[in-house]
Amino acid sequence: MKIYLVGGAVRDYFLKLPIKDRDWVVVGSTPKQLLKKKFKQVGKDFPVFLHPDTFEEYALARTEKKFGLGYTGFKTNYSKTVTLHEDLFRRDLTINAIAQDEYGNFIDPVNGIQDIKLRLLRHISQSFQEDPLRVLRVARFAAQLAHLGFQIDKKTMQLMNIIVKNGELSFLTSHRVWNETKKALLTYSPHVYFITLKKCNALSVLFPEIDNLYKIKQKYYFYNSKNLGNHFLFSLFNFSKKNKSIDMRFAFFCQFFTYYKNFYQKDYLNKDDNYQSNLIKKMFIRLDIPIAIRKLSYIVAKNYFFLHNIFFITSQEIVNLFNRMDVWRDPSKILKISILSKYCIFFSKCKYYKKNYINCFFKIIFLIINSISIKFIIQEGFKGYLIKKELTRLRVFVLDIYRLKVFLLK
């Protein structure tokens, strides 16, 4: 039995990146032998084991043969006779097919080290096109390594197009799609993930909501972009520089779906927020997105035009909005919404609209409204539903006073 370090750990060593996880491949062994050594089996489709002390993943060397459709249509062989080279040849990209033995020697049968130097994402063999998940993986690696100058090999991109054309993407589960998308959204360049999917025609299949943005011409050309698709990518790139949490990044690009309807309407106050919130709900269900990430996106989409025209709405409507968003129990929502709101898709003609000002405005009005104490209301003798009614009245009252002072100072 021989054990080799493989995959991302070896790749990141050559790229001088921090090594987060280490994966191992075991050659010349069986599941029974590993179980006797107290390894814990976790793999269902093929034997993957956790080390009893380090809890790192150890997989038996294997080969795969395509017999059906989708990424599950493979017959796996993990017998003792499978060699290290055979295991490496079944992998997706050359940069992920480098192994290191216990003495520190590197085994590189497909010239992965050279491709790392060339900053090239290249497939290993024609069998690349047998697994539709590789379209997403390549797109994700393109986003993950874009800041280091990596590009996708032309022939690899051609194979990705063939996978899409053959309809293989339809066999991917929502879990698989979201898992790769989540990893891509957490990279330095998440916009590259969607650019890559667009280039191989996968965007219209996996994210039709984003692909449709390319069909919407802009009334005003932002960043020299003639359609909302290009503007979306450029904006996501800028937003991601300062906002790294996945719920913020996901909520940010959900804002763009607000313009499917009414993009050319002059009255920004009367746009339909229900249309885009329903659109996003359908995407949540289709991709099975975790509830924790859904919440912020839905709040922003549901109240998008309301939030971006907050200077024009009454204090009563603002208090009602904060009640709907339940910011009292989770004040962090205000900070997130204020950040998202300053990255407005369009430039409002309102003379009060400034990116920094709208950001501060949300925080200030929340602090003012939240300063009203319920204890004070109870001490005044209010009971039951009258407590909430009086609390709302006082919140509206103090907010009106603040806004009047601001108006007078203008």
Image (cartoon, helix red, strand yellow):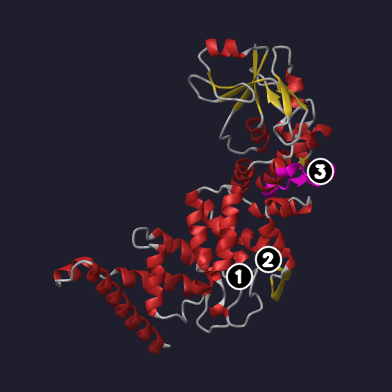
Q: Specify the amino acid type for callout 3.
A: Asn
Q: Specify the amino acid type for callout 1.
A: Ile
* Identity of the residue drawn at 56% across and 73% down: 272
Q: Is residue 359 above or below residue 244?
A: below
Identify the mark at residue 166; answer none if there is no mark. Answer: 3
Secondary structure of the residue carrying numbered label 3: loop
Q: Is residue 374 above or below residue 122?
A: below
Label 1 or label 2, whichever comes before in sequence order: 2
> Is 395 left or right of 209, judged from the image as shown?
left
Q: Is residue 166 magenta?
A: yes
Secondary structure of the residue carrying numbered label 1: loop
How far apart marks 3 and 2 lie (CA) works out to 30 Å
User: Looking at the image, can residue 241 be seen?
Assistant: no
Measuring from the top left, give residue 291's x and y in whole percent.
49, 50
Report the residue marked by disc 2.
Answer: 231
Task: Rate crowding at label 1 as few (under 14), some (14 to 19) or many (20 or more) other CA atoms within 10 Å.
Answer: some
Label 3 or label 2, whichever comes before in sequence order: 3
> Is 226 left or right of 354, judged from the image as shown?
right
Q: Is residue 323 magenta?
A: no
Label 1 or label 3, whichever comes before in sequence order: 3
| Quarter of the N terminus within the rendering | top right
| Quarter of the C terminus within the rendering | bottom left
Report the residue marked by disc 1.
Answer: 345
Measuring from the top left, give residue 207's x and y in whole percent.
67, 54
Q: Is residue 257 above or below residue 3?
A: below
- Range of residues picked out in magenta: 145-170
Identify the mark at residue 292; answer none if there is no mark. Answer: none
Predominant secondary structure, magenta span:
helix
User: Looking at the image, can residue 221 be seen?
Assistant: yes
Q: Specify the amino acid type for callout 2.
A: His
Tags 3 and 2 in contact by the CB under 8 Å rule?
no
Tags 1 and 2 in contact by the CB under 8 Å rule?
yes
